[in-house]
């Protein structure tokens, strides 16, 4: 059952920046004006900026950038397939989504958090996820894909994320094979796909697709080990974009996911990949080796040329454009 507070928030979101009288809110909600006031105060304690004006009522500030199902829903079509939950803090949105998937959560369940305490990156690495400045989002999927096609989900999400970033911020977004998005030479987003495989069929029982984005620089800046690599989409004071960005990612990814096996986005992924033609360093068989990226196969393997002019197709791995 939807609470008075949640319904009130949705009404204020629908009239963002415009005042609604307390009397009208009370009538619409079927509660007293005092109950409206209590709900407003509760939202304010959660961090929402809600103004009150005599003879005008209440209004949610257009500069408010807190995430909620209501704020994200404003940018989604009415018939969207998503069941969105927003948490203040989780260990990892991927971990939370995976727990829900194992409990039977339907495809399209979305977990979004303001902060992650154990954000996941590549195997053995973490994703820095401070409160209120990033977008941390995971989707429960039940794809009809074989285990060796997991890369389709990751690469589709990279294209969807790049499209969403360009639409919302106007910045060019490029992809570093296989799962990072860069703007202005800095990493702004990482993608992680995890799943459970049916051993008999070799197909996914479920998959969890996670995407983390540095929307603004954290207060005090990035940690020392990230300063040279990490970037952010916007500066403080440039407005509220996280809800729109979340919705646009969901829209773009879902459109690609409906026909994921066709890989219709392959050419766009390849075009956005800034590694092609560049010298790089790969971690291969436990060693770091100089190579050159020369192509991406139709199933998203990176084709590299080694110093002896032989070529190798990498299905996954860590690559760097920085020297050894």
Image: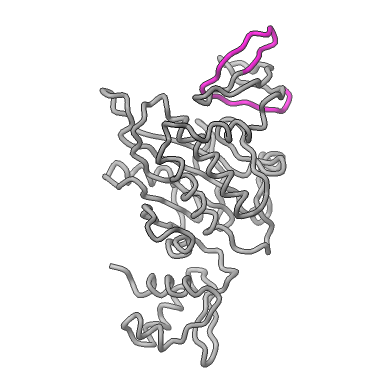
Instruction: Identify the residue at the far bottom of this view.
Output: 55
Return the x and y of residue 278 as percentages of the image width and height.
Answer: 71, 24
Q: Was residue 50 drawn as part of the magenta stretch in this picture?
A: no
Q: Was residue 308 drawn as part of the magenta stretch in this picture?
A: yes
Return the x and y of residue 91 as percentages of the image width and height.
Answer: 44, 47
Q: Quadrant of residue 51?
A: bottom right
Q: How is the image coloured?
A: one colour
- Which residues are the magenta region? 304-324
**Which SS type dominates the magenta stretch?**
loop
Q: In the rendered image, which quarter contains the C terminus?
A: top right
Q: Is residue 299 left or right of residue 7?
A: right
Going 65% across and 20% down the picture, which residue do you hit? 294
Q: In the rendered image, which quarter contains the N terminus?
A: bottom left
Going 55% across and 19% down the picture, which residue do you hit? 314
Going 40% across and 43% down the picture, which residue do you hit? 95
Q: Is residue 324 above or below residue 162?
A: above
Q: Is residue 210 above or below residue 14?
A: above
Going 59% across and 63% down the picture, which residue do you hit? 240
- 54 or 121: nearer the viewer: 54
Return the x and y of residue 256 as percentages of the image width and height.
Answer: 46, 41
- 144 or 207: nearer the viewer: 144
Say how many tags the image has.
0
Return the x and y of residue 115 as percentages of the image width and height.
Answer: 51, 53
Q: Quadrant of residue 26?
A: bottom left
Instruction: Identify the residue at the far right of this view.
Output: 323
Q: Quadrant of residue 177?
A: top right
């Amino acid at each position: 059952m939807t609470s008075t507070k949640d319904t009130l928030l949705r009404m204020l979101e629908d009239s963002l920046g415009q005042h609604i009288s307390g009397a009208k809110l009370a009538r619409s909600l079927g509660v007293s004006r005092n109950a409206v006031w209590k709900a407003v105060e509760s939202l304010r304690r959660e961090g929402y900026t809600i103004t009150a004006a005599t003879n005008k009522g209440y209004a949610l500030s257009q500069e408010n950038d807190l995430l909620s199902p209501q704020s994200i829903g404003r940018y989604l079509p009415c018939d969207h397939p998503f069941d969105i939950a927003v948490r203040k803090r989780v260990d990892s949105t991927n971990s939370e989504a995976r727990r829900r998937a194992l409990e039977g959560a339907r495809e399209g369940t979305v977990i979004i958090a303001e902060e992650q305490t154990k954000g996941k990156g590549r195997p053995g690495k973490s994703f820095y996820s401070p409160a209120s400045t990033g977008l941390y989002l995971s989707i429960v999927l039940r794809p009809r894909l074989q285990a060796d096609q997991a890369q389709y989900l990751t690469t589709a999400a990279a294209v969807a994320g790049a499209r969403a970033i360009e639409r919302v911020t106007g910045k060019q977004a490029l992809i570093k094979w296989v799962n990072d998005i860069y703007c202005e030479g800095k990493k702004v987003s990482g993608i992680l796909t995890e799943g459970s495989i049916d051993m008999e069929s070799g197909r996914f029982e479920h998959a969890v697709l996670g995407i983390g984005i540095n929307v603004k620089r954290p207060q005090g800046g990035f940690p020392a080990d990230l300063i040279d690599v990490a970037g952010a989409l916007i500066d403080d004071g440039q407005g509220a974009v996280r809800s729109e960005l979340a919705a646009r990612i969901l829209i773009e990814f879902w459109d690609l996911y409906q026909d994921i096996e066709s890989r219709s986005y392959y050419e766009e992924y390849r075009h956005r990949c800034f590694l092609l033609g560049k010298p790089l360093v790969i971690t291969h068989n436990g060693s770091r080796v100089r190579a050159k990226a020369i192509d991406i196969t139709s199933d998203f393997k990176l084709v590299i040329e080694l110093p002896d002019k032989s070529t190798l197709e990498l299905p996954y791995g860590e690559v760097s454009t920085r020297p050894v």
